[in-house]
Amino acid sequence: MTVTGPEPRRPGGMLGRLRAAAGRRPGPAAALAAWIEARLYVAAAFLVTFSILDRLGPPTPDAPVRDGLLAWDGRWFQAIAADGYGDASDPALRFFPLWPLLGRALGGLTGIDEGLVLVVLANAGALAAGVLLHRLVVEETGDPGLARRAVRLLALAPPSFVLVLGYSEALYLTLALAVFLLARRRAWWAAAGAGYLAGLTRPVGVLLMLPMIHQVVTDRAQRRPGALAAALAPAAGAATFLAWAGLALNDASAPIDRQQELRGWSEPVSRLFRAAYRGIRGDEGELFHFLAAVIVIGLTVVVVRRLGRPLALYCGANVLVMLAADNLNSLERYCLAVFPLVIAAAALSRGRRTDGWAVTAASAGMVALTVLALGGAYVP
């Protein structure tokens, strides 16, 4: 017996058609629709920011919006791509080298400015990450609907505006997702290559070792050279940068030291209590980071309970490292690297009404956070 009813009303307008496409089509089409939608929101945020600043007065030369798609860390990456690192005290050493090296290499080959190359690569990487996330979720859960929701939330999450800028997040996300997919398919040497590059891209790339070690330990049939290489490759990538710093700058620990100067270390529980206390006392930034941390902890619980152990290990280790920083600036952006959190959020948004609210809230949050970042009020 077939039960029929009134045909659901189709959302109108271009954004409505994009959302409908993201909700019903397979991985690449869903990823492309969400990718386009996100860039429309970021473009709107640029217009809003310029409008606000024009009302307050002409934008100052150092307003982040003046740097366009190379705002904030994008200028750091462009400078490294163009000029390399300085001595061991150079704060640029906290940025790992693969991303700016790609900008330099492709800029040299094409004659295009390194900054523009990084922006193009970042946007291409964001699309690739969406496609790979869809594939991973389908293979992990067998649920295409969950995969489509995860792709949309990844593209439209509030901090995802950095996937439009010249940041390294898109490259790292693509590599991390590739590691998990290749390991699931037992393509160990390819997983090792992706893991090595991830370790050269971000310091937290070394945490990809944990799910790979789990795979090797729990699956005795896979104790072969390729599997061991996949488990060790992320650390080898990071070690390559440290070894270069030792040879070129006579200080192998310089990249870690520069990172620590910015982030610092703190015991996570007491750090969150301090953030809550400072937020209550009027520090809006600390309050925002505290609320974000609470959401992240809740989503981590969902990851541990609903997803496989490799994803839970990767997620838990990343969240612990993020919350152990004395400086919580950019906490929300760092969460993008922890893609199991997005899968957990998609699992919680099951249902048409819940999914609609989640996407609407994420989209509005993206525009608001982008405006704050471009205006200099938020550090992405």
Image: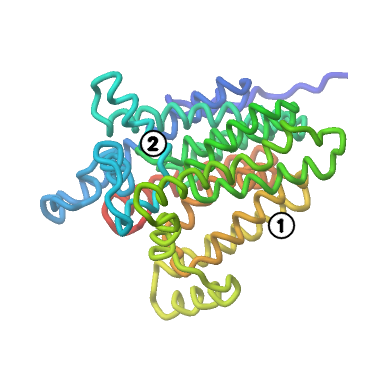
Q: For this rendering, which residue is in front, 346 or 14? A: 346
Q: Amino acid at mark 1?
A: Val
Looking at the picture, how far across and down is residue 29, in whole percent? 55, 20
Q: Amino acid at mark 2?
A: Val
| SS class, disc 1 | helix
User: Could you tell me if the residues under marks 2 and 1 are in contact, i.e. CB atoms within 8 Å?
Assistant: no
Looking at the picture, how far across and down is residue 225, in whole percent? 74, 33
Q: For this rendering, which residue is in front, 238 or 75? A: 238
Residue drawn at x 63%, y 60% as measured from the top left: 297
Residue drawn at x 44%, y 78% as measured from the top left: 278
Q: Up-down: is 314 above or below 141?
A: below
Q: Which residue is mark 2?
A: 164
326 to the left or right of 375: right
Of the numbered discs 2 and 1, the one sitting upstream in the chain is 2
Residue drawn at x 46%, y 64% as measured from the top left: 328
| SS class, disc 2 | loop
Q: Which residue is mark 1?
A: 301
